[in-house]
Amino acid sequence: MLFRLKNATIKVIAMLIVAIIPGCGSPRVAKDGGGPSRHSMGDAGTQTFRGHRDWLSSVCFTPDGKHILSSSADDTIILRDAATGRTIRTFRGDGDGITCAALSRDGQRLAAGTWNRLGRVWDAQAGKPLLTLRGHGENITSIAFSPDGDRIATGSGDDTLKLWDGKTGDERHTLQYSNEYDITCVAFSPDGKYLISGDGESTIKVWSARNGEELMSLLGHEASITCVAFSADGRRIISGSQDDTVRLWNAETGSELMTLHGHTDDVTCLAVSLDGQWIASGSEDDTIKVWDAVTGEDLATLRGHTENVTAVAFGPQGAHIVSGSKGVLKVWVNVVGATKER
């Protein structure tokens, strides 16, 4: 979940990091393989949770599905009860705004990037600060835990990716971009061997997460990349862009497999189901779309937000989707079946 600086205007871009990590920007669905039915999904009702005073930069369920974490440009991350919306704990940044956040796969650690160039890591259960990540020269735009939690990746407006020791906070590698565009999003592969990133031009890069070697570039989008994710089996890469499309790529060859058209404005965020069959994408057209990742069919359009959708995630049981906008968080219940907002 991310922010970008565009013509001196803050653009909030939420990023879904790795499809199999049940953390912010990395939700998962039930292992039973259940997914949305194209015959039963429709427009939803009206329930909303509030609490943030600015745009949301990320949303996610905790691994047990009982709580929701949301980060915002208002410099807070709120942990709330998923059923009632009651605030349980508020994590606070350094005053400049939280640009992105991620939860470790085990739900024990929370990491966030800020406008003041620092990364922060907390004990997600106790709320205790654990680490500060120092080294970027500009704001951190994106953050992700590796599947085993041993590494943290950050992207920045300083045109670099950094890999950090997830236990000590020590910097391990700096991956330098050759262009002058902000890095907007990052994601680990399910096996932790690869890292993907998108930039403010239109390029997706694949890197070795072991040594930082650049392996491949994916070209095809016609505007800034806003969000990236791997499928659960690691065989596909999914991306969203300001060209209003979601695209699927062969992770081994880099060839484009499919382009999903349907949004009428920038795609800002996306989520991928655990089995890789379903994709949810949020957009500046104020909607969320649910797609069949195999056929590319547009299964449903979820309407209810009145401003840009900037964050989206699947719940751990697969039936729910959580989404965020300016100061607003919505929980869409029973996506498998009759879709409605909680």
Image: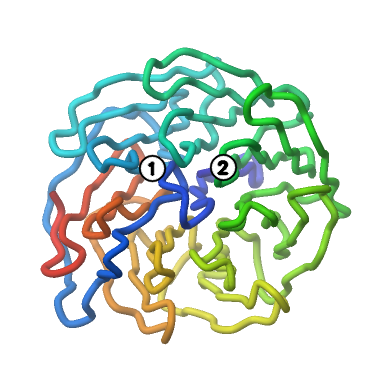
Q: Nearer the viewer, residue 164 or 261?
A: 164
Label 2, secondary structure: give it. loop
Classify 264 as above or below 166. Answer: below
- Residue at 63%, 25% in the rendered image: 167
Residue 251: give x, y in percent of width and height: 65, 72
Residue 329: give x, y in percent of width and height: 28, 42
- Residue at 13%, 34% in the rendered image: 84
Classify 7 as above or below 293. Answer: above
**Residue lying at the far bottom of the rendered structure:** 295
Residue 165: give x, y in percent of width and height: 70, 30
Q: CA distance from mark 1 to mark 2?
A: 21 Å
Q: Residues within 10 Å of mark 1 (few under 14, many from 20)?
A: many
Q: Which mark is residue 59?
A: 1
Amino acid tagged 2: Asp
Q: Which mark is residue 191?
A: none
Q: Earlier in the sequence, mark 1 or mark 2?
A: 1
Q: Residues within 10 Å of mark 2 (few under 14, many from 20)?
A: some
Q: Which mark is residue 148?
A: 2
Amino acid tagged 1: Val
